Image (cartoon, rainbow, N blue to C red):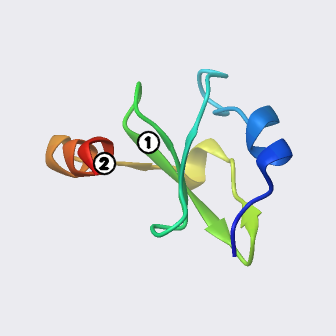
């Protein structure tokens, strides 16, 4: 289930308040500056710092480079 474009435009990282990248196939919102991924559960972004997962450098590179 894809997130609405208008919703994506207003969502921000709960930690640094910056823009998030949406990876529909991964079902995550991603902050590349902090290398933190936030889950999307049942179509709802879970933007809680405690729910974010820090990704490895390798996983970060895979996401960014497609």
Residue 64 vs residue 39: left or right? left
User: Residue 31 location, x and y as percent?
Assistant: 48, 35
Query: Is 18 situated above or below 35?
Result: above
User: Residue 65 location, x and y as percent?
Assistant: 24, 43
User: Residue 35 location, x and y as percent?
Assistant: 37, 37
Image quarter of residue 24: bottom right
Label 2: how many Cα within 10 Å (few below 14, some 14–19, many 20+): some
Q: CA distance from mark 2 to mark 1?
A: 6 Å
Label 1: how many Cα within 10 Å (few below 14, some 14–19, many 20+): many
Name the residue at 31% across, 50% down.
63
Query: Mark 1 or mark 2, which is nearer the start of the sequence?
Result: 1
Which sits in the foreground, 30 or 23?
Answer: 23
Total numbered circles? 2
Which sits in the foreground, 26 or 56?
Answer: 26
Query: Is 33 situated above or below 11?
Result: above
Residue 50 vs residue 60: left or right? right
Q: Which residue is mark 1?
A: 36
User: Residue 3 location, x and y as percent?
Assistant: 74, 60
Secondary structure of residue under mark 1 = strand
Residue 6 vs residue 16: left or right? right
Q: Which residue is mark 2?
A: 55
Residue 29 vs residue 8: left or right? left
Name the residue at 85% across, 43% down.
6
Name the residue at 63% across, 33% down.
13
Asked if marks 2 and 1 touch (Cβ < 8 Å), the reply is yes
Which residue is outermost to the right?
6
Quadrant of the frame with the N terminus: bottom right
Secondary structure of residue under mark 2 = loop
């Amino acid at each position: 289930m894809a997130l609405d474009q208008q919703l994506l435009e207003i969502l921000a990282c709960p930690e640094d308040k910056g823009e998030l990248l949406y990876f529909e196939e991964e079902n995550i919102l991603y902050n590349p500056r902090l290398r933190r991924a936030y889950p999307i559960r049942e179509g709802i972004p879970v933007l809680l710092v405690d729910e974010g997962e820090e990704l490895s450098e390798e996983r970060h590179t895979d996401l960014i480079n497609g």
